[in-house]
Amino acid sequence: MDAILMKIYEYYVGDDRDMLLRAYDYAKNAHENQKRASGEPYFIHPCAVAEILVELGLDAETIAGALLHDVIEDTSATDEDIRREFGEEVLSLVSGVTKLDKIVFKSQEEEEAENFRKIFIAMAKDIRVIIIKLADRLHNMRSLNYLSPERQKRMAKETLDIYAPIAGRLGISQIKCELEDLCLKYIDPEAFEFLVENIHQKLEERNRFVDFVVEEISGILTESNIHGEVFGRPKHFYSIYKKMLDKHKTLEQIYDLTAVRVIVGTVDECYEVLGKIHKTWKPVPGRIKDYIATPKPNLYQSLHTTVVTNFGQPFEIQIRTEEMHRTAEYGIAAHWKYKENRENETSLDARIAWIREMMELQGGFKDSKEFMDSVKEELYSSELLVFTPQSKVISLPAGATPVDFAYAIHSEVGNHCIGAKVNGKIVPLNSTLELGDVVEIITSPTSKGPSRDWLKFIKSPSAKAKIKTFYKKETKEDNIRLGRGMLEDAAKRKGYTLSELLTPESFRKISEKLSFDTQEEMFAAVGYGAVSVNQVFFKLVDYYRKEVPQPVELRPFKAKNAQGAVTVKGMTGLLVSFAGCCSPVPGDDIVGFVTRGRGVVIHRTDCPNLRNVEAERLQPAEWITGGGEARFKAAIVVSAEEQGAALSAISASIAEMKLSLTSINGRYDKNNDAIVEVTVSLLTKQDIEILIDKIRSHPRILDVRRMSN
């Protein structure tokens, strides 16, 4: 705790220092008597988070936000207290982090996706919120050993999936590398210990080799009259681990465990040093990368080359200027750390433009899950660098097509694209681009817009969102008509009309769930696929069934096992029962089968057991509407990838509809698919159809149907 006070006095002056000292005292008093899982005072945590951010060079407001980031959530402090004591800007940062801290990542995929979207909303509003959160996560990972093994693995996986990639995309390599190493320690502890032990064993030998390389390159700089710095940097464990996994290599086959960095004054000197190093040692073909001319998406710049010494030892060299080195180490945090050379706001906007673009396009995604998948693809995708005819570099995901390229240039270029040339030759729009291709897009002002078929082959998440946004805006009226028609058809199939289901009250309720401002907006969303017909229709039916009095159940015959009231043409005084093989329910088309000695048995007309019976023994039958107390049993069969998925879908759907389960049996078929047979007690055919649709909408369900034995 004293360490952060020393850093406040060292790095901040005047009003900034006064505010930070007040924030320190305020947080210390607020967290008094609170303990961490380790038993240490809780105040150690915000101090450690603030210290990490001081080292990154963040401004005083961010450091104050770090010191106070848990007081609203964990103490009696309120928003108004923070606003009064520290101002609106600090409150905004604290509130932003508090909202992120309330996110609990659970196994439910939809909830995780929605929480992921909230992270990006916070980033788009103020990037400092996620920087505080990254420092918060880093300190929590450093003290993860005090939690249970289950929580350790869950938190490490979440960090590796989300927070480490975000740190990398923001260019903050210090945090990214440490987070990845800490995650590896808990996700694969055996591999981590193996690397620590084996890399340490040869540390002295490797250091001698690095010292030799550093001395040789320093000599090259001196001879060339270039002022610079040369030093070795060990690769972090996770990068070595990933290389061993991805390339199926042993540790002995990974030769670049240490990289040598050369820091010089100008870009020209970078290329001059590269040439002289290649003159001294032989470069490895295919291992020369020019990130100065073609920076990475996070604005990282450097020259990379792998060379082989005269005695056969390969090693990697990175050459960059001091400014490039700052960006490589601190990423977006360099905007605050190096105040004497602070970049302008335009440069800061360029660093986070991808975040804002994803947020602007989120309306084009079907749901939060699709948004999360698209952003993860953006975070994890390999780079493909191609060129415009004017030699501008465009960075695309691996496997990208000319359509991806067109939308990377501008939305209008993509929307009016009718063809493409790659390296001067006309190619299909679904062609896969390769590194270094020169791409030219052919457009037409009379183009009616993008083809929906493009969505099948493009790779860029932003291109997909732009195409969906086009259809959402440009074909709004068509989508309204299409969506309305789809809902009307769904209602008609289930025996309803859309007008009776869609009342002002039911729309108000559904808009609270799905965030629609008008009915036309809802119809359009259904029309272009932002929400499914079932998502809207099932909710309307649920509201209708709760608000509108339902018809009473059918009055049964007095026969002991009868399930409902029917009339059989030309038959009187006979015992009537219902077939167990097809379990007819009101609303099914039915027929009476005259048995020998058991009266009339009612079957569904599509029952397979009636295919070969004598036609004269079949009598027309129909349901009698009216009052009564009978419920009906219907059997369905569900096929799924595995029994757990089937049981989960069945139980959730039955509970949602408030039906009764009367029997259930499970088995596996010859294809090893899970088969679950279920009998439920219900009112009408509409119930069973809705239940089937609900179960079918669950993931990992292969098929659902009425059962006929």
Image (cartoon, rainbow, N blue to C red):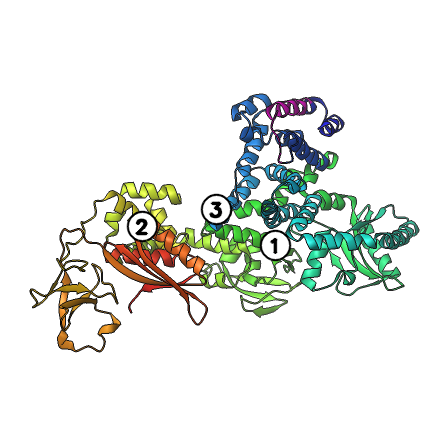
Query: How far separated are the C-alphas under marks 3 and 1?
Result: 21 Å
Looking at marks 1 and 2 on the same chain, the residue that comes earlier in the sequence is marked by 1
Magenta part mainly helix, strand or loop? helix
The residue wearing badge 3 is 111
For the point 70% across and 64% down, the residue is 248
Element type at mark 3: helix
Q: Which mark is residue 657?
A: 2
Residue 672 drawn at (x, y percent): 46, 68
Q: Quadrant of residue 673?
A: bottom left
Q: Residues within 10 Å of mark 2 (few under 14, many from 20)?
A: some
For the point 32% across and 62% down, the residue is 636
Q: Residues within 10 Å of mark 3 (few under 14, many from 20)?
A: some
Residue 409 seen in the current view: no
Residue 500 drawn at (x, y percent): 23, 48
Closest to the camera, between mark 3 and mark 1, is 3
The residue lying toward the viewer, choosing from 246 and 612, is 612
Query: How far separated are the C-alphas under marks 3 and 2?
Result: 22 Å
In the depicted structure, whether residue 285 falls above or below residue 681: below
The magenta segment is 18-37
For the point 24% across and 69% down, the residue is 606
The residue wearing badge 1 is 380
